[in-house]
Image: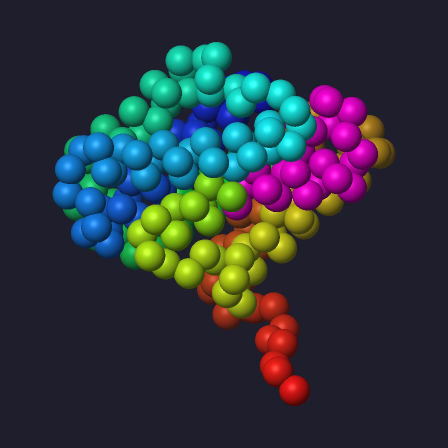
Amino acid sequence: MIYWLDLIGTFVFAISGALAAWDKKMYHDIFGVSFTAFVTSIGGGTMRDLILGVRPVWVGDKNYIIAIAFGVLVTILFRARLLRVRRGIFLFDTIGIGFYTVIGLQKALLYGVHPWAAVILGMISAIFGGVIRDMMVNEIPLIFSRQIYATACLAGAALYIGLRHVGVDEDWNMIASILLVIAIRLTSLKKGWSLPYLQKE
């Protein structure tokens, strides 16, 4: 299940990256859109794997490249409809960080990382690709804004660790943790929640 969730997250982030490139009208060719989708999809997982000292998973598994290509194809075929949907990019990004938070956390735990460090690696897995995407399309990365973004990932990862500690079934734990990330992110946007603003003295 972890493997398939990882592929789904890769696919969703590919759509997020391709839509961001298209929405900004910075790339008008298939290579530019595909490259943005690729970096968005594998950026966080690659950073996590490098920290863990292992080979990034997409290097040895063609299915990740296929998932990215499929995400780009879906974007090309349905881009007008997707871009007309309000906050379409936001929605795909939110789903992606939910999946990648749990996937990154699980992989870190598999390699014997302390649970607290695993929570941070789960967050890195989720947000780093989006950081690269935003910089590529000349946007300020969301982690530098007051939006609830990385905090949602940390909350979902913390829930996973807590439920794991009390022996909750693994599949249900994954689903609950992913949904918590998505719920916090969507609710924070709807309610206008934000982190405290630090002012210069």
Q: Is residue 125 magenta?
A: yes
Picture coordinates of residue 139, whole percent (x, y): 36, 58
Q: Is residue 21 magenta?
A: no
How was this image coloured?
rainbow
Looking at the picture, does residue 143 appear above or below residue 100?
Answer: below
Q: Report the residue at 21% width, 32% height from top.
A: 31
> In the rendered image, which quarter contains the N terminus?
top right
Q: Which residues are magenta?
A: 105-127
In the displayed structure image, the side of residue 43 where residue 21 appears, left or right: left
Picture coordinates of residue 51, whole percent (x, y): 64, 32
Picture coordinates of residue 194, whole percent (x, y): 56, 68
In the displayed structure image, the side of residue 100 where residue 87 appears, left or right: left
Q: Report the residue at 52% width, 30% height from top.
A: 46
Q: Report the residue at 80% width, 34% height from top.
A: 114
Q: Report the residue at 33% width, 57% height from top.
A: 138
Q: Residue furthest right?
A: 166
